[in-house]
Image: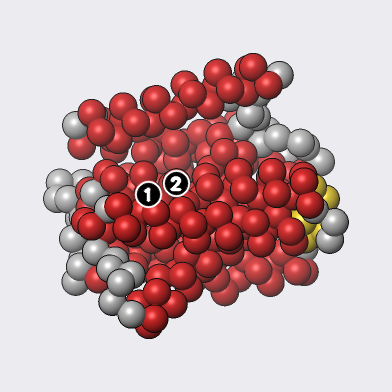
Amino acid sequence: MLKQRVITAFAMLFGLLGAVFLMPRGGWMAVCSAVVGVAAWEWRGLQARSGVSRFLFSFVTVSFFGATVVAIGLAETPASYSAGLASVLACGVGFWLAIAPFWLGAKWPMHRPGVGTMVGWLVIVPAGVALVVLRDIDPWMLLAAMSVVWVADIAAYFVGRAFGKRKLAPSISPGKSWEGAIGAVVFVLIFGIVVATTWPALGVDIRRGVGTQLAYAAVLVLLTGVSIVGDLFESLAKRQAGVKDSGSILPGHGGLLDRIDSLTSTLPLVALALVLLRE
């Protein structure tokens, strides 16, 4: 199993790097559409819907994503500020910051008619738009945002296994601990410092003073927290569906949603912040 996980992980990483840095913009848009479609298929499956319903939801979600990209001007022009673009990203950010934490606390069901559809679109579509936007702004910026999530996930796993005693959300994801979450924050801060000091193009000069350092640290802590919320939210969806994985498309890893759950919550936040800064 471990060998299979490692092989799949490397295949995904090299495939991602090739798509991000080598594909033309149209090719990347097609990749984003495919990601949206597969994620929608798996999300609908978590609502225990039939194959026909899953196909229709996936088709409608990809169409909705494509229509959104066209409507906000991303189809032809690389990302630049527009009220439409900011609104789409803000919908995703608002869901993760203002609704998802309460949803986790109340453990509201996601399989009610209409609820699963609306939540699925809020989870998937802004994340797909963020993939397009961040790559347009800077492929390295997209990779940096993803790397923050990966560092948080890996650190939380290993620190949690080594030191985890206090459960973070035992009724949602028994394996996660407060110690793991703290470890994620610590390692993300270390990673962020390394990136800021070795990548001047990031535009963060942490030598400017304590104010800049604290603001930068706060952003990294926020991103880590949001990534954990995204992870827990998909865990709640799987627990309510009574399944371990969202799918089986990735050998040794489960479904696509299992691998991008934290990205769906984090990327819209990063994209919105950069779009507003570039206004």
Q: Quadrant of residue 43?
A: top right
Return the x and y of residue 210 as percentages of the image width and height: 39, 81
The residue lying toward the viewer, choosing from 10 and 201, is 201
Report the residue at 76% width, 36% height from top.
Answer: 244
Q: Secondary structure at mark 1?
A: helix
Could you tell me if the residues under marks 2 and 1 are in contact, i.e. CB atoms within 8 Å? yes
The image quadrant where one finds the C terminus is bottom left
Q: Is residue 24 above or below residue 234?
A: above
Where is mark 2, residue-wise? 147
Residue at numbered disc 1: 144
Judged left or right of residue 104, residue 9 is left
Q: Give the left or right position of residue 259, taking residue 177 as reference.
A: left
Q: Is residue 7 left or right of residue 199?
A: right
Give the numbered dot on residue 64. Answer: none
Residue 32 appearing in the image: yes
Position of residue 242 measured from the top left corner of the image (x, y, whole percent)? 81, 41
Which residue is the extreme one toward the left? Answer: 77
**Label 2 amino acid?**
Ser
